[in-house]
Amino acid sequence: MTSSELENLIRAKLQDSRLLQVVDEFKSQFLEFPDEFFVELVITDGAKLVDVERIAREMRESLRKQSIDLDVIVRAIWTVREVGDPCTPADASGNPQLGRWRVPVTLASGGLTQQVEVDVLYTVVLDLKNRIAGKGWSEASAVKEVVREFIEMELSLGGESYWDPIRYSKREINGSALSYLFMHTPVAHTLGIQL
């Protein structure tokens, strides 16, 4: 079997289930390696994840019976719908967890929304506070902008390094993550920060 044959087989299964229309043809990939195949199915509607994952699982099991190894990732394209206001999170006893701000984020993928939380270490908040002094940004607004850029960067990753916000709904921004954001995204420029 070739990667083209595998692609045609998977596309036919998706078409039969009326799911092919949610597959992003440009971002999905079908790769052939000496010992296995790798397929990444990228879909535009997170509400269809379970259905597409079921088909992928069935294909993997069917090919395994033919001694063909298939590694499949099914992921949705998510967008940031809203970044909420930062707050101090509480621990299990209801006491405030000092040293971090928690920012709620609402993501959307087609007909599905997902809530995630981003913890921003307070050292990052202090660093931002110092860098935005006199630039017209409040701490909360600057943190929300950093969180938006961070989540968008996380969502842009594909392949084996993709982030699944349904299974892993918590993220954290520490000093290293902030430095990376400043170097690789436009957030420093947006905030008026000179590096």
Image (cartoon, grey):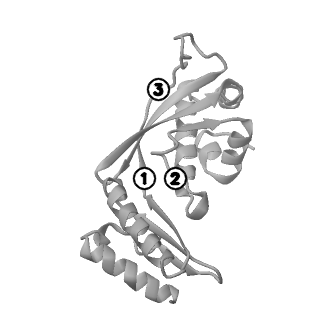
Q: Secondary structure at mark 1?
A: loop
Please tell me which residue is depicted at 61% across the width and 50% down the height of the picture: 186
Amino acid, disc 3: Asp
Please tell me which residue is depicted at 45% across the width and 59% down the height of the picture: 75
Q: Earlier in the sequence, mark 1 or mark 3?
A: 1
Q: Secondary structure at mark 2?
A: helix
- Look at mark 3 in the image and give the residue it sits on: 85
- The C terminus: image quadrant: top right
Q: Is 13 situated left or right of 32 in this image? A: left
Q: Earlier in the sequence, mark 2 or mark 3?
A: 3
Q: Work out whether residue 13 or residue 58 is closer to the camera in this orientation and state it.
A: 58
Query: How many discs appear?
Result: 3
Name which quarter of the figure residue 43 lies in.
Answer: bottom left
- Look at mark 2 in the image and give the residue it sits on: 155
Please tell me which residue is depicted at 58% across the width and 44% down the height of the picture: 150
Q: Position of residue 47 (x, y in %)?
A: 31, 53
Amino acid, disc 1: Trp
Q: Work out whether residue 177 or residue 96 is closer to the camera in this orientation and state it.
A: 96
Q: Position of residue 173 (x, y in %)?
A: 64, 36
Q: Work out whether residue 141 or residue 2 is closer to the camera in this orientation and state it.
A: 2
What is the C-alpha distance between the residues marked 1 and 3?
20 Å
Reply above or below: 114 against 29.
above
Name which quarter of the figure residue 76 lies in.
Answer: bottom left
